[in-house]
Image (spheres, rainbow, N blue to C red):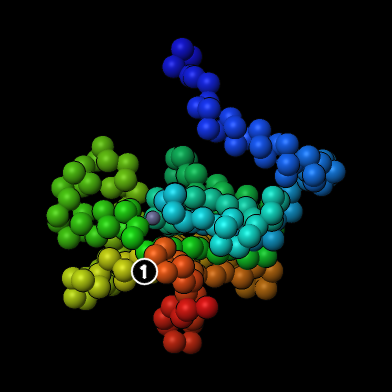
Amino acid sequence: MQYVKHLPTYMVQRYLGWKATTYTENKAWYRRLADEGQRPRAMIISCCDSRVHVTSIFGADQGEFFIHRNIANLVPPFTQDGDHHGTSAAVEYAVSALKVAHVVVLGHSNCGGIKGCHDMCAGLAPELEEKSSFVGRWMNIMRPGYDRISSLPEADRTRALEKEAVLVSLENLMSFPFVQSAVEDGSLTLHGLWNDIGDGSLHQYDTATKSFIAI
Ligand SMILES: [Zn+2]
């Protein structure tokens, strides 16, 4: 493990600052979180993009949100093929073990994953079509979504696909039997959001109008 190095100084300093202030001032609460285990109210599925900042947007405290991040905030369809399914494992644990009351899929503007997906589906990114591309294979989840927006003017397609990614993920969530039964018995609600990074707006999917409406 010669390749594993110590943290860069800026990270060490930030950690020590947190430990001396936030942690020290709330030590009893952290101890209680450790002793009693986590009981998050909601699971949030967001993109890995560093500009999507779930805990800033919602001002979340430790223990409040069960957060899963992946490229383009996607949930794959329910498949039991014995393979490695990180996102499905996170959904299973949040819904079946932690019994969260809400699952929120949070999409965002200027998403590089969605741009890549658009280019791949439009035939402009042959490198993403390769079997060796993890990003390309992951983005295959969005092919049905691309088909639904491909007739739009080119300038509108990427943004439409970002929102479509939220809807495809919500549809795929419902393909998990334990999600479907929790939704049907009223113990779980699903939510679709899209965040505009530049203007800070947050839009939520409205079933009645079948569109994303600013909060
Ligand atoms: Zn993204």
Quarter of the image where one finds residue 183:
bottom right
What residue lies at 31% left-to-right and 54% top-to-bottom? 112
What residue lies at 47% left-to-right and 56% top-to-bottom? 52
Please name whichever residue, 10 or 43, is drawn nearer the observer in this view of the structure: 10
Please name whichever residue, 165 or 21, is drawn nearer the observer in this view of the structure: 21
Residue 209: in sight, yes or no?
yes
Q: Amino acid at mark 1?
A: Glu
Tell me where residue 215 appears, x and y as whole percent.
52, 78
- The furthest residue to the bottom: 208
Position above or below: 133 against 116: above
What is the total number of numbered labels drawn onto the structure image?
1
Tell me where residue 150 appears, x and y as whole percent.
21, 70
Characterize the local packing of mark 1: few (<14), some (14-19) or many (20 or more) Cα atoms within 10 angstroms: many
Residue named by callout 1: 164
Tag 1, which secondary structure? helix
What residue lies at 25% left-to-right and 70% top-to-bottom? 157
